[in-house]
Image (cartoon, rainbow, N blue to C red):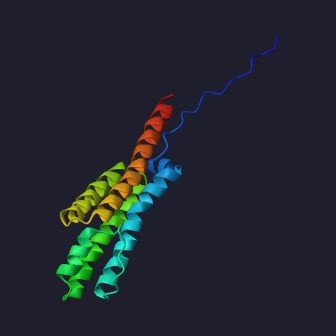
Amino acid sequence: MIPEPQVPPAIPQAAPTKAELARSSPRVQKSASWFWWIAGLSVINSISAHAEGGMHFVVGLGFTELVDGFFHSIQPIAYLIDLLAVGFFVGIGYFARKGHLWAFIVGGVFYTIDAVIYAYFQDWLPVAFHAYALFMIYQGFAQLRVLRAVGEVQSTV
């Protein structure tokens, strides 16, 4: 009599972490990086505004432009407020790249509010570019939601 082979019991797999899911998707990473681009180009816009360089990136923040204009004669205050706004978007980008859905939502909401600043002044090119950036950010958010849903289903099987 031939003994039946023993099949080891299946080892339950742990659900992938948020960071693992985010790292596994280039789309999530690229979308989250938009927050860093927004922050970086806002810094360049602020430096250019205070140096009266005339250069301006449309993907930057309208908020920092308002601050730079309002506090043009008090540059340290303008730079401090700009640093807080830029730091916010750097932090949002960091958490979005780690797979936190809330970071995409909060960052998207604040960037939408920023687009309203440009719309108020009827500066439509930055509004259009904000819409494009928000679409790109949304794609990463949507991809991360799908990955998380699939990860949860796979971990229960």
The correct choice, above or below, for 132 with respect to 13 in the image is below
Q: Nearer the viewer, residue 100 or 134?
A: 134
Which x, y percent locates residue 11? Answer: 58, 33
Q: How far across and down, in percent of the image, does residue 71 sit?
A: 18, 83
Q: Residue furthest right?
A: 1
Q: Nearer the viewer, residue 112 or 79?
A: 112
Residue 131 percent location from the top left of the image: 33, 55
Residue located 54% across and 33% down the image: 12
Name the residue at 46% across, 52% down: 28
In percent of the image, x 44 and y 48: which residue is there?
Answer: 18
Q: Viewer-proximal residue, 150 or 54?
A: 54
Question: In which quarter of the view is residue 39 placed?
Answer: bottom left
* Side of 6 where 18 appears, left or right: left
Can residue 15 be seen in this snapshot? Answer: yes
Q: Is residue 143 left or right of residue 116?
A: right
Picture quadrant where residue 88 is located: bottom left
Q: Position of residue 124 (x, y in %)?
A: 28, 62
Q: Quadrant of the N terminus?
A: top right
The residue shown at (41%, 42%) is 145
From where the camera sits, is residue 23 visible? no
Looking at the rendered structure, the number of numbered marks drawn on it comes to: 0
Outermost residue on the top side: it is 1
Of residues 11 and 151, the one drawn nearer to the viewer in this rendering: 151
Can you say whether 117 is above or below 142 in the image? below
